[in-house]
Image (cartoon, rainbow, N blue to C red):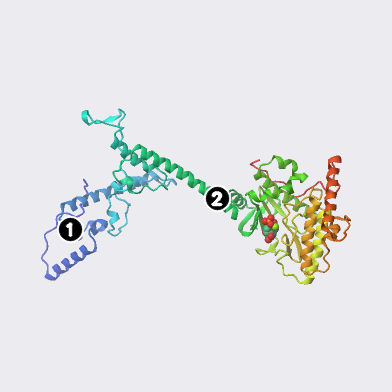
Amino acid sequence: MCKTESPWGSAAPAAPACSLAEVMSEQLAKQLDEENAVFPALSDPAAELLPDEAPDTTSDLMLAQMLQMQFDREFDDQLRREEKKFNGDSKVSISFENYRMVHPYDDSDSSGDEVDWQDTRHDPYRADKPQTTPRKGFTGKGKNITTKHDEVTCGRKNTARMDNFAPEVHVGDGLGMDLKLSNQVFNSLKRHCYSEQRRSARLHEKKEHSTAEQAVDPRTRLLMYKMVNAGVLENINGCISTGKESVVFHADGGSLEEQPVPDEVVLKVFKTTLNEFKNRDRYIKDDYRFKDRFSKLNPRKIIRLWAEKEMHNLGRMKKAEIPCPEVVLLKKHILVMSFIGKDHVPAPKLKDAMLNSEDLKNAYYQVLHVMQQLYQECNLVHADLSEYNMLWHEGKVWLIDVSQSVEPTHPHGLEFLFRDCRNVSTFFQKRGVSEAMSTYDLFNAVTGLNIPVGAEDEAEFMAEIVALEKRNEDHIQKRGKKTFPVTSEDGGPPLEPDADD
Ligand code: ADP
Ligand code: MG
């Protein structure tokens, strides 16, 4: 046992003669002490050395417990010293926690909290280690032989094995009880746990997908963090828009080799949820620039193609000096481009901009000019042009959202253009711009074609357009040449090397 001073001190010296008042006060102190805590001296190391304040030591059981406690504490102290010595300054440390006698280890002079008293060598919630059967396969002798197949031993073993179930499986107090689970029960419990685990994994997966619907999926998030890590972006601030096909974030630009990154940029994240893009196949499938690649790609890569398409189209527009976002970087399905707006406030869409009639007229002529430039200089048809995809910023109309834009020689290019013209004419006419041309006149003004505008019969006009497209298609088939002017260079920065491809 321990050789140090015992907790209750050495034999008390003969009591010195004292006054009645002193005796009374001593008794009162003792009484108070007893009321306050059952064994205050034991939880307070300092008190252990003061024989005067030692607690009641009349019971043998209590004496034994106190002795044991003192012994355990010393053991823990020693363990702590060894732990310290072993770990030194190492960043990775080993804990001897599990070998401690008194739990939780407490070297502060805490109150006489009951938990401090608990000797947790016998954790009531922890099963005793199952008895192992020796190699020979049985224990005991003669009549008392117990084999490893013994029902009771097996049952207890099975109960203890529940401890190995996944943490989220609640086994309750079962482990602490003397439960004997038959193999059959144990096996079906185990099967249930596995299937539950798989189910929760599936649920988790679904959750990941649903966040992808609202914002971005974990893969995209990682790509975005990488951009911040690489210093291309300083910070990603927040979402500007969540559309059907893309999510647009505002970010502070950082720096990119050879290229200054604007102070404010947007990240257009093309959604990796594929459903929405199915409808748009026809924009890209028949675009000769992407035709060959389209057929060979899986859906995830097709989405990257959208981002790539937007980048190339913006590149062409920039060359023609059409007001549009400037491409900074393309990384898989994330396109980083300059921000149209100021101080985190995006420029309003034409639909939302509060324009006076003068500005509206001005905007109309800008749109007309931009459409002509797009068609004649960039060899492009926007294909989704409307007051939703034009921003009003610093007195100018800015074109955005050009991932679906195609060349006029696209088999449906002129139809798309006609639709654009209708959106533009309708918007400006509704807003009272008297100068706004009819859809047909606008179409002719943009293309330079002279499709006769009869009785404003849309069917007739459309038939004419479709016939034109057909003639052009035949022409391409025969001669491999395009009737409409086509520029070979797309412009835009080079594609990022793609690790996955
Ligand atoms: P979607 O295909 O989802 O319509 P858009 O390119 O039209 O994608 O972007 C959606 C919205 O995000 C736009 O209406 C606009 O408000 C905002 N936005 C997109 N690009 C920019 C940009 N470069 N600067 C400022 N706002 C932008
Ligand atoms: Mg849009």
State yes or no: Cβ of the residue under disc 1 lies below 8 Å from any atom of ligand 1: no
Q: Rate crowding at label 1 as few (under 14), some (14 to 19) or many (20 or more) other CA atoms within 10 Å.
A: some
* Residue wearing tag 2: 208
Relative placement, left or right, of 262 versus 177 is right
Residue 192 at x, y percent in the picture: 42, 43
Relative placement, left or right, of 58 versus 122 is left
In this picture, is 155 found above or below 420?
above
x 68%, y 41%: residue:
297
| Quadrant of the rendered image containing residue 140 | top left
Mark 2 residue element: helix
Ligand 1, by image quadrant, is: bottom right
In this picture, is 483 found above or below 398?
above
Q: Rate crowding at label 2 as few (under 14), some (14 to 19) or many (20 or more) other CA atoms within 10 Å.
A: some
In this picture, is 115 found above or below 191?
below
Mark 1 residue element: loop
Identified by mark 2, the residue type is Glu
Q: Quadrant of the C terminus?
A: top right
Kindly report the distance in space between the C-alpha atoms of the residues bearing marks 1 and 2: 62 Å
N-term mark: 1 or 2? 1
Identified by mark 1, the residue type is Asp
x 74%, y 56%: residue:
384
Q: Quick one: 25 or 449, which is closer to the camera?
A: 449
Query: Does residue 426 show up?
Result: yes
Q: Quick one: 430 or 248, which is closer to the camera?
A: 430
* Residue wearing tag 1: 56
Residue 414 at x, y percent in the picture: 81, 52
